[in-house]
Image: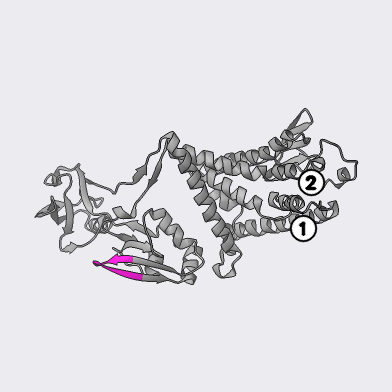
Amino acid sequence: MDIVIKVLQFILSFSLLVIIHEFGHFFFARLFGTRVEKFYLFFNPWFSLFKFKRGNTEYGLGWLPLGGYVKIAGMIDESMDTEQMKQPVKQDEFRAKPAWQRFLVMIAGVVMNVVLAVAIYIGICYTWGDTYFSNADAKWGYNFNEAGHKLGFHDGDRLVSIDGEEADDINKVVNSLIITESDRSVVVERNGRQVELILPLDELISMRQQKGYENFLLPRIPFLIDSVVNPTVAQLRKGDEIVAIDNVSGLDFAGYGQYLKAHAGVSVLLTVLREGDMLFEFKAPVSENGTLGVIRKGLALRTQKYTFLEAIPAGIQRTGKVISSYWDQLKMIVQPKTKMYEELGGFISIGSIFPSTWDWQDFWMKTAFLSIILAVMNILPIPGLDGGHAIFTFWEMISGRKVSDKVLEAAQYVGLIIILFLLLYANGNDIYRFFIK
C-alpha cells in the first residue's frame, strides 16, 4: 500500500506539472493566432489511450508517461515532422509569426511552471505558515550521527555560524553542507568556548554520496517532565528535569532512555532538578518496557504565520530561493570535483521523494519543487528543450537573421540525442542504486 500511495502522488504531481507546462505553450500559441494541432498528456507513439478533437486541436492521453507535448503547426519539434515544413507557409503557422511572438510561445511553459511554484508557495505560506526548528532553541546542543563525528563534530556542540553566516533554520544548515563546491568553515560552541571546524570538500562529497546527511544532527533534549501517568513517580511535577539516574549524569533524554531500557524491571535512583535550583532524589521502579511512566516535554518548532497579503511576497521570495539553490546544484553537476553527476536520478528517484502516507502540505511542497526543476531544466539552451528553441529565436530577434530550417532540424536531432543520453544515464543510475548496488 505504501508504494501505491507514493506512485499515486507522483502521477498526480507529474501530470499537473506537465499539463500546466504544455498549457503555457498552448495558451500563447492560441493568443497569437497559431494553430495547435495536438495537446497530449504523456506521449502516444503508435496509439493513444483516448483522444477527442475540438476545433483544430486533438486532445488526448498517451500511454508513455515520460512527459507531454503540444504540436504547433509550422514548428520543428520532437515530432520531427519535416514534410510540413516543405509546404507553403500559412498565416496560422508558428513559422509565420514574428520572432518575439515565437519567443514568448517557447518560454511560456517555463514561465507557467514558475508561476505554479509561486502560487503553491503562497498557498503553503497562507495555509500552514513556515514551520522550522531554530538553532537558537538548541540550548543543549546536538547529537551527531557517524558522518557528523567523522567531520569533527562532538555530541553537545552548538552551531554558531557557517562560513561567517549565523546558523538558524536547521534544515537550511544541513542543506548548505550538502550543496557546496568548496570546503566549509563551521564555528561551534563546545564546553563554553567557540571552536572552528574546517570541513573538507571531499569529505562532504563522501557524506552526501553515502547519505550521511540523514539524521545528521538531532537536538539534544533534556529529560524534562510534561506530565506523570504512573503513580510510582508521583513525586515528579511538570517542569522537573531528571539530571541523573543512579550515578549516570550529563546525558540527554535519548541517553537516559537507553539507560532505562538496560535496567528494565528494576528500581533506579532519580536525581531531579526542580525550578532550576532545588535537587532531590528518590527511588523509582522501571517498567518491563524500560519506562518510568512519564511524558517528556519536547522541543517546540517555530512557525511563521502569514496573512494572505503577507503570503504573496513570502511565496515569491521562497520561489526565488529554491530556484537559486537548484541552479547552484545544477552548476555543480558539471564540475567533476563535486561528483554530483554520479547522483543524477530518474523517475524512480523523483517518485521516491514522496512519502508513503498522504500529506497535502508535503505533496504541495514536493510539487512546487518539481515545478521549479522542470522550469530550470527546460530553459537550458539544449536543442529539443524550450531553451534550445528560444535561443535560436532570440538570436533572430537581435540579429535580424532567421536560422535556416536545416540548421534547426540538425540541432533538433542533436538535442534529442543529448536528452536521450541524459534520460538513459539518470534512469540507469536509479536501476543501479535501487536494484543492483
- Residue 108: image location, x then y, percent: 66, 42
Q: Is residue 366 visible?
A: yes
Residue 317 or residue 437, whichever sits in front: 317
Q: Secondary structure at mark 2?
A: loop
Q: Is residue 91 magenta?
A: no
Q: Residue at x 48, y 47 (%)?
A: 318
Looking at the image, residue 314 sits to the left or right of residue 233; the answer is right
Residue 64 or residue 278, whichever sits in front: 278
Q: Residue at x 67, y 58 (%)?
A: 422
Amino acid marked by disc 2: Ser
Mark 1 surroundings: few (<14), some (14-19) or many (≥20) residues within 10 A: some
Q: Is residue 234 above or below residue 426?
A: above
- Residue 361: image location, x then y, percent: 46, 40
In the current view of this chain or complex, which residue is farthest to the top? 54
Q: Secondary structure at mark 1?
A: helix
Provide the major secondary structure of the magenta segment. Answer: strand
- The magenta span reads 188-196
Mark 2 surroundings: few (<14), some (14-19) or many (≥20) residues within 10 A: few
Disc ID at residue 186: none
Q: CA distance from mark 1 to mark 2?
A: 14 Å
Looking at the image, residue 18 sits to the left or right of residue 228; the answer is right
Q: Is residue 195 magenta?
A: yes
Looking at the image, residue 210 sits to the left or right of residue 192; the answer is right
Q: Is residue 54 above or below residue 230?
A: above
Disc ID at residue 79: 2
Q: Is residue 2 above or below residue 332?
A: above
Looking at the image, residue 219 sits to the left or right of residue 260; the answer is right
Disc ID at residue 414: 1
Specify the quadrant of the image occupied by residue 22: top right
